[in-house]
Image (tube, rainbow, N blue to C red):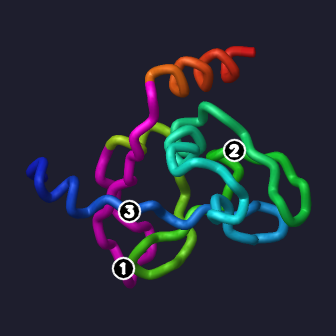
Amino acid sequence: RTSAAEVRENCFRTEVLCPRCHVPWGAPSEGNPDYYYNFMMQGLRCFTCATCLTNFGCLTAVHKCPWCKDAFEYDVDGYHKQILCGNAKCKKRFGFKMFHASENAMKQARQQAQE
């Protein structure tokens, strides 16, 4: 069993890549607030790649392990959990960082996801 302190210490903003051109998503130059990472990882929003204009979400994006940098298969249900890297040479445990988002921003994201 993992303690709450371990969970917080072991959480990362994992690298998310466009599934088409493999350019990292969420760079500060894109102008999105940090909490858009939460929206992406919870499946509340899709985003457009600034390089190739592909529209994608968390299930089609490429996700990289923070330890070994290999791709891993992401599932929305894993966002609030610690998961194991699927790479046989890594197998390290990690979680996903959650950024502060106002209640209004969360409400708007949920409404947009239902549309």
- Name the quarter where the C terminus is drawn: top right
Mark 3–mark 2 Cα distance, whole angstroms, equals 18 Å
Mark 1–mark 2 Cα distance, whole angstroms, equals 26 Å
Please name the residue shown 68% across and 68% down the image.
Answer: 24
Please name the residue shown 46% across and 70% down the image.
Answer: 65
> Picture coordinates of residue 31 (x, y %)?
69, 54
Q: Is residue 110 above or below residue 17?
A: above
> Picture coordinates of residue 43 (x, y %)?
59, 36
Rendered image: mark on residue 20 = none
Residue 42: say if magenta: no
> Picture coordinates of residue 41 (x, y %)?
53, 44
| Label 1 neighbour load within 10 Å: few <14, some 14-19, many 20+ | some
Residue under label 2, please give it.
57
The residue mark sitting in front, 3 or 1, is 3
| Label 2 neighbour load within 10 Å: few <14, some 14-19, many 20+ | many
- Segment colored magenta: 81-102
Q: Secondary structure at mark 2?
A: loop
Q: Secondary structure at mark 1?
A: loop
Residue under label 1, please give it.
90
Q: Is residue 38 above or below residue 49?
A: above
Query: Which badge, 3 or 1, is on the more N-terminal residue?
Result: 3
Q: Is residue 9 above or below residue 58?
A: below
Q: Quadrant of residue 49?
A: bottom right
Q: Nearer the viewer, residue 65 or 37?
A: 37
Query: Which badge, 3 or 2, is on the more N-terminal residue?
Result: 3
Residue under label 3, please give it.
12
Please name the residue shown 72% across and 59% down the image.
Answer: 30
